[in-house]
Amino acid sequence: MHKPVAELALIEQIRSGSRGGARFPCVALGIGDDCAILRPPRGHEVLVTTDFTLEGRHFRRDWHPPQSVGHRALARGLSDLAAMGARPQAAFLSLALPAEMLGTRAGRLWVTRFFEGLRYLAGLHNCPLAGGDTAESPADLVLADIVLVGTAPAGRALRRSAARPGDALYVTGALGGAAAELGILSRTGKPGRRVHRVSMLRTGPVPPNPQLYPWPRIEVGLALLRRHLATAAIDLSDGFSTDLTHICRESGVGAEVLAAALPIHPLAAKLPQQAIRLALHGGEDYELLFTAPASVTMPRSVASVPITRIGQITRGSALVLIDATGRRSPLRPGGWEHFTSA
Ligand code: ADP
Ligand code: MG
């Protein structure tokens, strides 16, 4: 089937917006040919992750501005690389757009802004868009799939399976903010704080708009690996309780979590009744959860991101939450179920 003119024009727009592979050591050939050619650094392994961003499931066009949709699509993949301590090297984007979006001015503006959000985040992490595919969506829905390629020194990538009894448990940044901001969006249809320019988003220790513009912790992951500060790691996409369960299952261990130690995002802290629940089960914070032997002296911050000790790894398989009075209760995975259950 021939590609419609509108799609060809879009590919041209994407191509001209990408600055070519020259500046990026790993990309020998970027957008423009049938394949990209990647050249990983000697002594490194290649890590690959892929993530859907589906309208109605991962975002809503009436809640998430287009820049946010592009940002989040890339952030999901970057966060997976961060969790393994990998350096991002190239991104690939398969994008299906409704016909109406390719054919109208407002639609084309949406797409331009989507790429603005994606490219700004890509630029912060030196990760070029090196290829993809573009098609007309079979429905009135934006569907995207992002592939991220990263590299890590051979044999050194951080895995979920390396936590050991006695290890301390840490999180980066703060929890519950993404779910709290989603609550604001769903009640008001507006972000908690209007975002005009994506470039204004990077200040402070935690993301001010954690649902719309989460900050994947690439620099933290790289530093944890380089400085031998972590045994196991995972990124918090599904929710703390669910992602902790993943680490524990893969490592064959249990965990104890101190509720009072959980770092609460300011947006969640405004809802004191719900703060702990949002932090434990809210999801989409894209912080890192990691373990380290108790003998490791953990800095208070890594790559300028606050690190908080929140519990420890135990023998067995039980996940236990300990409240401020010392009462113990089972911690069950209750992570993010996306908009279908909202
Ligand atoms: P082919 O038909 O050979 O798959 P396309 O015409 O689909 O090639 O794409 C031409 C070039 O544009 C390729 O290098 C491809 O990687 C790139 N490209 C197409 N769509 C996208 C996209 N959504 N994002 C980034 N690059 C894209
Ligand atoms: Mg081809």
Image (spheres, rainbow, N blue to C red):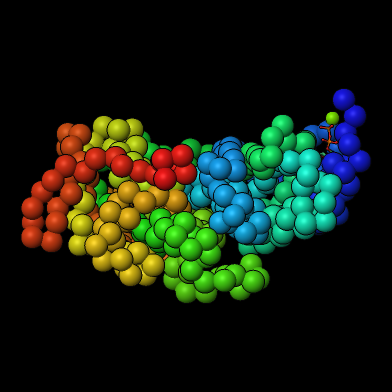
Q: Is residue 231 visible?
A: no
- The answer to which image quadrant residue 171 occupies is bottom left
- The answer to which image quadrant residue 105 occupies is bottom right
| Image location of residue 300, percent across then percent down | 33, 68
Q: What's the residue at 77%, 36% (across, down)?
A: 136
Q: What's the residue at 75%, 45% (across, down)?
A: 130
Left or right of residue 313, residue 299 in this image: right
Left or right of residue 326, residue 40 in this image: right
- Locate the N terminus and report the quarter of the image it occupies: top right
Quadrant field for ligand 1: top right
| Image location of residue 46, percent across then percent down | 60, 38
Image height check: is 256 above or below 177? above
Outermost residue toward the front in this view? 188
Q: Is residue 318 visible?
A: yes
| Image location of residue 10, percent across then percent down | 84, 47
Q: What's the residue at 35%, 43% (across, down)?
A: 335
Outermost residue toward the top in this view? 1
Image height check: is 62 above or below 153? below
- Locate the C terminus and report the quarter of the image it occupies: top left
Q: Nearer the viewer, residue 320 or 36?
A: 320
Left or right of residue 166, residue 280 in this image: right
- The answer to which image quadrant residue 164 occupies is top left
Q: How many marks?
A: 0
Q: Nearer the viewer, residue 169 or 158?
A: 169
